[in-house]
Image: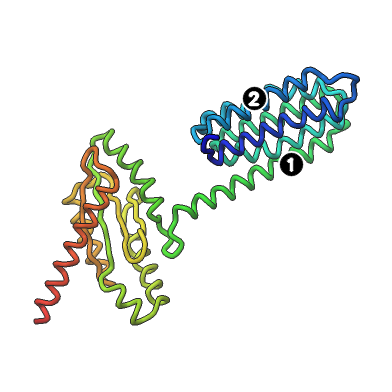
Amino acid sequence: MRKQNDRSLAAAAFYFAGGLFPLLNATVFRLTPFPRSDLLLIATLCFCTTLGILFIGDRFSRTAAGVVMSVPLVTVVPNVLLSSQELRVLSLGFLFFPYFIFVVWFLPIWFARLLGYSWLALFCGAVTLKYGFDPAAVLLVLVVSGASLGELVHRFKQRLERDAITDPLCSVWNRRGFEYLLSKAVAVAERNERPLALVYLDLDNFKAINDGRGHVVGDQMLRSFAREIDERIRTEDVFARFGGDEFALLLIDCDAQQARESAERLRSEVFAPAWSFGIAEWRPGEQSKDFISRADLSMLADKQRRKVAAVDSSA
């Protein structure tokens, strides 16, 4: 079997369950002497879709997921109108919970809400059309609980995504978040033919501070440094902690000279603890790792010059 991703496995599981329920209703729990052909057809289509998704595997894109998860909207009304028992009709409502959770988790929230609330409207409308207002209480519970669950999942997903790209100690972007924003900034810079510069920052003698004064003091120093820098940069710039005592500052619409002037200004204003920096200006077609590496090497050269200057001044 082809390698799968979370999206393909979840979609396959949803369609497998969607095929299993009508299959059981048409065979084990059937109310007629012969299995209903419409239920068998639905089960067959669901199982074929499951196999198709598993065959595609990790190539099952978000767009494909959106198309596949739009199909249940077409089957909601016929399933309700063709079902012979009210209890079985209402049991279809339970499929809304995994459906809404899937679309909220894997699809853009505006599209997830469009699909989810359209499903609810079609289902509730079809049930009311067939049975009147008798099941209104059940439908109300379904709507309130389903919508609440979906919105809670969305908030939880947002928090996870935010935590994944934020440094927990300094409350600035982490390297993953920085590289994501860097790719967007590069695309804009190349499209508009605008400059882009990177400042790589590293605290001087931080290991000695950690070893001599303890990690608590070191952490406080990192938080204070990050806050001081973050307060002095523009809103459109991107400031991140790469790990340890290394930080990166992406300056939008700045060339190397402007970046150097900005870095010197920051170092004159945030001078404790002492820190070194390196500059790199984006080169069209350059890989992000090479862009970052050039700034890092420039920072190491600056750090070495500062060490030599410190030794010469003390001699």
Q: Is residue 28 left or right of residue 308?
A: right
Q: Position of residue 42 (x, y in %)?
A: 72, 22
Q: Quadrant of the C terminus?
A: bottom left
Classify mark 1: helix, strand or loop.
helix
Q: Who's the residue at 24% across and 57% down the image?
A: 296
Could you tell me which quadrant the N terminus lies in?
A: top right
Quadrant housing residue 77:
top right
Residue 268 is situated, as x and y percent measured from the top left of the image, at 22, 66
The residue singled out by tag 2 in the image is: 48
Query: Could you tell me if the residues under marks 2 and 1 are in contact, i.e. CB atoms within 8 Å?
Result: no
- Looking at the image, tell me whether mark 2 or mark 1 is earlier in sequence order: 2
In 3D space, how far apart are the residues under numbered discs 2 and 1 (Cα atoms)? 33 Å
Nearer the observer: mark 2 or 1; the answer is: 2
Place residue 110 in its image quadrant. top right
Residue in front for this viewpoint, 197 or 17: 17
Relative vertical location of residue 256 with respect to residue 97 in this rendering, above or below:
below
Per the image, label 2 sits on a secondary structure element best described as: helix
State left or right for residue 216 relative to residue 148. Answer: left
Q: Is residue 232 above or below residue 39?
A: below
User: What's under tag 2, amino acid-wise?
Assistant: Cys
Position of residue 296 relative to residue 218, above or below, is above
Instruction: Name the residue at 44% across, 56% down.
Output: 166
Mark 2 crowd level (few <14, some 14–19, many ≥20, 10 Å Cα): some
Q: Residues within 10 Å of mark 1 (few under 14, many from 20)?
A: few
Residue 168, percent from left and from top: 46, 62
Residue drawn where x is 30% and y is 41% of the image? 186
Q: Amino acid at mark 1?
A: Val
Q: Residue at x 39, y 46 (%)?
A: 180
Viewer-proximal residue among 309 and 83: 83
Q: Which residue is mark 1?
A: 144
Q: Position of residue 69 (x, y in %)?
A: 61, 29
